[in-house]
Amino acid sequence: MQTQSMASQSGDKAGDQPVLSTADLADKVTPSVMQVLCYGKPEVQVAVQSQDSATNMPRPVIPPTLLDAAGYDAIGFDYTSFKNVSYAECRQACAADGQCKAVTYNLKYRVCFLKDNVVALIKNADALAAYSSSKAADVIRSDFTSFSGMDLPGGDYKQIRNSSYLSCFTACIGDNSCKAFAFVAKKKECWIKDMLGRPKATKGVELGVK
């Protein structure tokens, strides 16, 4: 703290005991301090990345784990999908695939989407998501809500052709006038909306609402 010019307060010393210097205090405390290294479960192989210069002990590389996000859709690049699987099977498929960084599982249709990237989570009552802990610091929990098989007719003021769900989502985020977007997967079309109409069930349309 002193080297960083941080102010601090000390407690009152007990009785007439002398105040120890940092060096003397370290000499007294050191015999009672033990280093504990945790390498996880025995069946997990942990790679050694480098040595810690202070302790000269190997520094373990902690393998990334999947973090669950119930009620969210992970927004990223889908590179494959599986039908008629459970969420547990979807999660296992991602954990076993080094390319996978996130999954979205559609509860209604039992479809699993594996993604090689994840940039945000948006609310979706019909979805379960999981994403790699290595991406945790970068993932945004947005204020969007996603609806599968729904549309809001009207309010379209911009069309983006040859689009993806991710690019449709980011286009709406970057436009202050955008209140919702509709992505038509079959046609790869994105429609940006500046007003909210009455929701309508529409097959093949993915709707995002701020």
Image: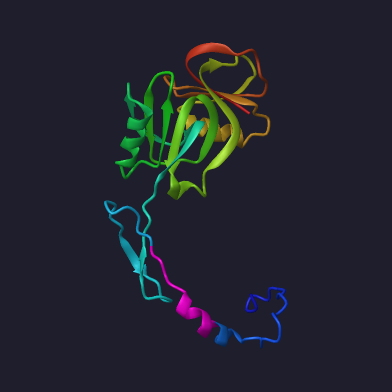
User: What colour scheme does the image use?
Assistant: rainbow
Side (left or right) of 94 relative to 8: left
Q: Nearer the viewer, residue 57 or 157?
A: 57
Is residue 197 something that shows in the picture? Answer: yes
Quarter of the image where the N terminus is located: bottom right
Q: Position of residue 22 (x, y in %)?
A: 59, 84
Quarter-wise, where is residue 4 in the image? bottom right
Q: Quadrant of residue 10?
A: bottom right
- For this rendering, which residue is in front, 29 or 155? 29
Residue at the image point whose x is 42% and y is 36% from the top: 77
Residue located 66% across and 19% down the image: 196
**Residue 136 horizontal/vertical position (percent):** 49, 47
- Residue 183 x/y as whole percent: 50, 23
Q: Residue 135: percent from the left, percent from the top?
A: 46, 47
Q: Residue at x 68, y 21 (%)?
A: 195
Q: Say above or below: 85 vs 103.
A: above
Residue 93: in magenta span:
no
Above or below, comparing residue 137 to residue 25 in the picture: above
**Residue extending furthest front?**
15
Q: Visible in this render: residue 163? A: no
Q: Which residues are magenta?
A: 26-37
Q: How many marks?
A: 0
Q: Can you say which quadrant of the picture contains the C terminus?
A: top right
In the displayed structure, 71 sits above or below 29; it is: above
**Residue at the (47%, 76%) spot, across then down:** 32
* Residue 47 vs residue 113, the one in the foreground: 47
